[in-house]
Amino acid sequence: MQIIPLVKPFIGKEEEEEVIDTLRSGLIATGPKTERLEREFAAYLGRKHAVGTNSCTAALHLGLLALDIGVGDEVVTTPMTFLATVNSIIYTGARPVFVDIEPDTLNINPAHIEKVLTKRTKAIMPVHLYGHPCEMDKILDIAKRHGLRVITDCAHAIEAEYQGKKVGSLGLIDCFSFYATKNLAIGNGGMLVTNHDNVAELVQSLRDHGMSSGAWARYHTGELQAYPMIHLGYKYIMWDLPAALGLHQLRRLEQRHKKRLEVAAKYATALQPLDTYVEVLRPRRQIRHAYHLYVVRLKGVDRNWVAAEMEARGIGVGVHYRPVHLEPFYRERYGHLPGEFPVAEDAGARVLSLPFWPEIKDEDILRVVNTLEKIIGECRN
Ligand SMILES: *Cc1c(COP(=O)(O)O)cnc(C)c1O
């Protein structure tokens, strides 16, 4: 039985050659390719600064630190996200405060944000889930009126646009993931973008032990001078081997995004006859969906059973996500209970991610949909 995976990265000849070039150059740590990827990524989004890191988790952590968020502070976010979003808040000593999501996009619901603000609230961390932009007008307006910072998790949303603008250009800080499964995949890696010189400078220092100058600058200036440690930093740098992949992944992004839209449209059409049991998530108007994941919501059938049966029949599926507040750690530490965020909990019990990548074949899409139909039929009997 041929297995259809949930996602497949595309690594071309260009990536292979760039990696070999990097190996032969001898500069395999942070160096010229990281700098080039930072420059080109910033240009893609129209931002002044892009700072490479070893993950999006690291970028979020450093972004919060650069906003001076720490013990005693609160950051508002969504429970419908990957653990890393919320964990990054806890690393700083701040407390994550959840609000429920919108039933159609599954993004943070701006209507609930103001209800949870306190004098300790310092920032809002929206997540553009699956690549669908959040209602940034409303979120930015709330932030402005209450003097809050906006730091966004754009791990799913490099190509996404809100009212004609890249979502990665809307926050004070926006953070991206280049993990193996993401739209721009380099294995492990991330990026923080901002227009603020002081934020960029601080994050550049914090990602490299808190020294006053980065490793590459230290190396290529060749000067034997001291680079004093100013902050307690981390080892969160990006390095050139994965950055070499990123240069070509970035070039392929727009062309692959066109195919993402086509695959999404094919799924929507093929799933139409199943609409009693399988609800397609429709994008809102005036947005550009990045389609990192293709997620449906099941009705009247047991999601966990359907997911297990799909896997058993060679089709990779996913659950993005089970709400973060119900993880044992979060229940234990913050006393969260089921029923607190009903929209997120309902979605968490019913979402199913289907195999999705730009190059997926039509026959594989059909097999996914036919298998789903068969399983639902069996489930009904
Ligand atoms: C993947 C992901 C992250 C973490 O990215 P890493 O680069 O693996 O640290 C954060 N948030 C969301 C929504 C993600 O999907």
Image (cartoon, grey):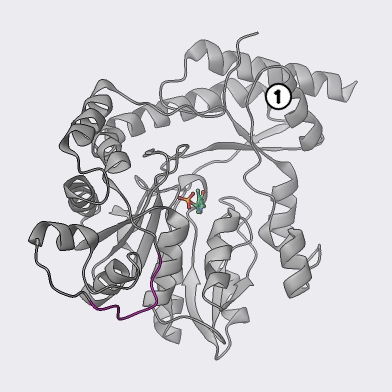
Is 51 left or right of 6, judged from the image as shown?
Answer: left
Q: Position of residue 296 (x, y in %)?
A: 63, 36
State whether residue 170 appears in this view.
Answer: yes
Rendering quarter of residue 318: top right
State whether residue 171 appears in this view.
Answer: no
Instruction: Return the residue at label 1.
Output: 311
Query: Looking at the figure, which quarter contains the N terminus?
Result: top right
Near mark 1 (Cα within 10 A), the count class, few <14, some 14-19 or many ≥20, is: some
Query: Looking at the figure, which quarter contains the C terminus?
Result: top right
> Which residue in the rendered view is the most extreme toward the right?
381
Q: Which residue is drawn at 80% across and 64% down?
A: 339
Q: Position of residue 338 (x, y in %)?
A: 81, 62
Magenta residues, dominant SS class:
loop
As helix, strand or loop, the secondary structure at mark 1 comes to helix
Q: In the rendered image of this protein, does residue 132 appear above or below residue 175?
A: above
Of residues 269 and 33, the one drawn nearer to the viewer in this rendering: 33
Is 351 left or right of 173, judged from the image as shown?
Answer: right
> Which residue in the rendered view is the most extreme toward the front?
224
Numbered disc total? 1
Rendering quarter of residue 221: bottom left
Stretch in magenta: 228-234
Magenta stretch holds residue 74:
no
Magenta stretch holds residue 233:
yes
Residue type, numbered disc 1: Glu
Q: Where is residue 228 in the image (x, y as percent from the top left)?
A: 24, 78
Of residues 62 and 44, the one drawn nearer to the viewer in this rendering: 62
